[in-house]
Amino acid sequence: MKKLLIVILTMLIETGLLWGMSIFIKWDFMETIFLGALLIVAILWLFLYFSNHNQNVFYASVKGLTGADAGGVKLFRFRFPPIILGLILYMVLSLCVTIFYYYDYFI
């Protein structure tokens, strides 16, 4: 129940953030909903990926220069805690809403 509440709260915060950005840049909300959600997930994924990458480079350089074992190189695994799950679920739902809204243009 707590995880479901976090997922819903994440989706509401993201909706508010994208709605505020659409007002700020004077675009229609439907034009920013999917691309904004995709951008937020991409930024989060890149941040998590490159922080793991930098840690692995540091461990490898310490091992190569000094021979001391500073820690093992870890494989990047994208995990799905409730906040990330909410972001991804919002992205999928926004894609569905965008396709439904612009359905006439796809035919």
Image (cartoon, rainbow, N blue to C red):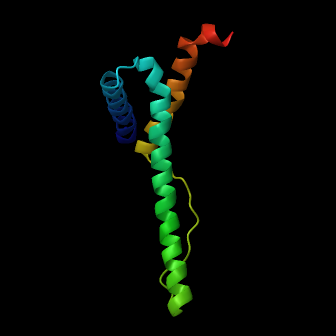
Write the residue at 50% across / 44% down: 42
Which residue, as the protein is rendered here, is positioned at the far bottom?
A: 67
Q: Is residue 60 above or below residue 52?
A: below
Q: Looking at the image, can residue 39 be seen?
A: yes
The quadrant of the picture occupied by the C terminus is top right
79 horizontally vs 24: left or right: right
Give whichever of 65, 67 is nearer the camera.
Answer: 65
Write the residue at 50% across / 78% down: 59
Which residue, as the protein is rendered here, is positioned at the far right?
A: 107
Give the x, y percent position of residue 12: 34, 29
The quadrant of the picture occupied by the N terminus is top left
Q: Looking at the image, can residue 90 be seen?
A: no
Q: Is residue 56 above or below residue 35?
A: below
Write the residue at 48% across / 41% down: 41
Quarter of the rendering containing residue 7: top left
92 horizontally vs 105: left or right: left
2 horizontally vs 86: left or right: left
Give the x, y percent position of residue 57: 53, 73
Which residue, as the protein is rendered here, is positioned at the far front?
A: 25
Quarter of the rendering containing residue 24: top left
Give the x, y percent position of residue 17: 33, 31
The mark total stands at 0
Q: Is residue 5 above or below residue 57?
A: above
Write the residue at 51% across / 52% down: 79
Give the x, y percent position of residue 22: 36, 24
